[in-house]
Image (spheres, coloured by chain):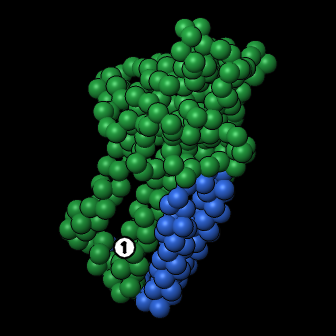
């Protein structure tokens, strides 16, 4: 469920930019159906910083192919809890030399290294901790920049698989046929995260938002944005 | 010949010393290449998705390259 913080103002940019009077309201309230479809965003808190995994109307975030009239409605990353394994590994590796050195002292390894060169052990340790810094940086950047973006025109899935391979997929809202959320597993159920699968027209591949927070809410937002796009 | 005598013999030849030193420097050299690739990759990431914290990321990632160069220098001096 969305957290209950400061709601987005009614005159937030994304709402005000919806063209009026293109499709008149059915209830005679004077609000266009596109606006009605987008008004639901007011119940979500606006992102205060850009380290969140569920940023509604993120501030000062842009992407390379963004058009002038295009607004980012939702920016998603993997749920923060999915970072726990690599954080634990990094912590374990940090303390590993402290545990290993007394043991290897018994085995005579330290004495052996000191006999080869007095500076070998400090260099090995410096290199070890440098490697941990690199490991943390790579994992953090992969988490931070593996984003899924929902705009008022399309969905974007940006995946960095490793240092040398990345994938950029996008689908126009009008081409989307089906949106499904898949949530499962013990941790996923506790922390409310799961996959959102977006099926587009038959010739196109489907987009997958992996382990994003509040998958049901994401589906709801996509559905509303699609509806707004249809009436625009 | 026990293990201690064997080690003493090996160390006295200095072959193992050069082996260790060469291996260590090679590893650190490869690591520097890795850190440079990381700089390039993060820079690409930041052009694809522009975030306000980009300058901080740039500093951190360059600091990482600087650190790896320092470790190489340290290894060259101390080993």
The part of the image, by quadrant, that contains residue A127 is bottom left
> Which residue is rendered at x = 26% and y = 72% of the image?
A108
Which chain did the image draw in blue? B
Colour of chain A as rendered = green
In-front residue for pair A207/B34:
A207
Tag 1 subunit: A
The extreme top residue here reads A26
Single out the residue that lies furthest toward the bottom. B77
User: In the rendered image, which residue does mark 1 sit on?
Assistant: A125
**Residue A95 picture location, percent across and down:** 26, 61
Q: Residue furthest right?
A: A203
x, y percentage for residue A94? 31, 62
**Mark 1 Cα-neighbour bin, 10 Å: few <14, some 14–19, many ≥20:** few
State whether residue A159 appears in this view.
Answer: yes
Residue A194 sits above or below residue B62 on the image: above
- In the rendered image, the vertical position of residue B34 relative to residue A202, given as above or below: below
Q: Is residue A66 left or right of residue A15?
A: right
Q: Residue at x 34, y 25 (%)?
A: A1
**Front residue (pair A99, A32):** A32
Q: Residue at x 63, y 35 (%)?
A: A17
Q: Is residue B38 left or right of residue A112?
A: right
The image position of residue B45, as x and y in percent, is 62, 54
Q: Classify B75 as above or below A6.
A: below
| Disc 1 element | helix
Q: Is residue A79 visible?
A: no
Residue placed at 23% from the left, 71% from the top? Answer: A105
Q: Is residue A76 above or below residue A50?
A: above
């Amino acid at each position: 469920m969305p957290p209950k913080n400061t709601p987005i103002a009614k005159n937030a940019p994304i709402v005000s930019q919806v063209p009026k009077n293109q499709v008149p309201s059915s209830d005679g309230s004077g609000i266009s159906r596109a606006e009605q479809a987008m008004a639901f965003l007011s119940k979500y808190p606006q992102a205060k910083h850009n380290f969140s995994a569920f940023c509604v109307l993120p501030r000062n975030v842009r992407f390379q192919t963004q058009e002038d009239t295009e607004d980012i409605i939702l920016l998603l990353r993997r749920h923060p809890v999915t970072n726990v394994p690599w954080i634990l590994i990094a912590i374990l590796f940090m303390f590993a030399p402290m545990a290993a050195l007394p043991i290897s002292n018994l085995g005579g390894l330290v004495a052996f290294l000191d006999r080869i060169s007095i500076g070998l052990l400090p260099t090995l340790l410096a290199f070890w901790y440098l490697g941990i810094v690199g490991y943390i940086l790579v994992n953090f950047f992969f988490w931070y920049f593996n984003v899924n973006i929902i705009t008022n025109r399309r969905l974007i899935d940006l995946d960095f698989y490793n240092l040398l391979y990345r994938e950029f997929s996008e689908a126009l809202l009008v081409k989307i046929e089906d949106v499904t959320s898949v949530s499962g597993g013990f941790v996923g159920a506790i922390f409310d995260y799961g996959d959102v699968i977006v099926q587009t027209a038959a010739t196109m591949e489907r987009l997958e938002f992996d382990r994003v927070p509040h998958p049901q809410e994401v589906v709801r937002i996509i559905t509303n944005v699609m509806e707004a796009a249809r009436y625009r | 010949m026990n293990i201690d005598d064997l080690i003493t013999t090996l160390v006295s030849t200095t072959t193992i010393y050069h082996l260790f030193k060469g291996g260590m420097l090679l590893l650190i050299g490869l690591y520097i290449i890795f850190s440079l690739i990381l700089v390039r990759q993060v820079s690409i990431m930041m052009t694809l998705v522009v975030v306000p914290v980009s300058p901080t990321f740039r500093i951190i990632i360059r600091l990482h390259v600087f650190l790896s160069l320092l470790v190489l220098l340290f290894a060259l001096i101390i080993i």
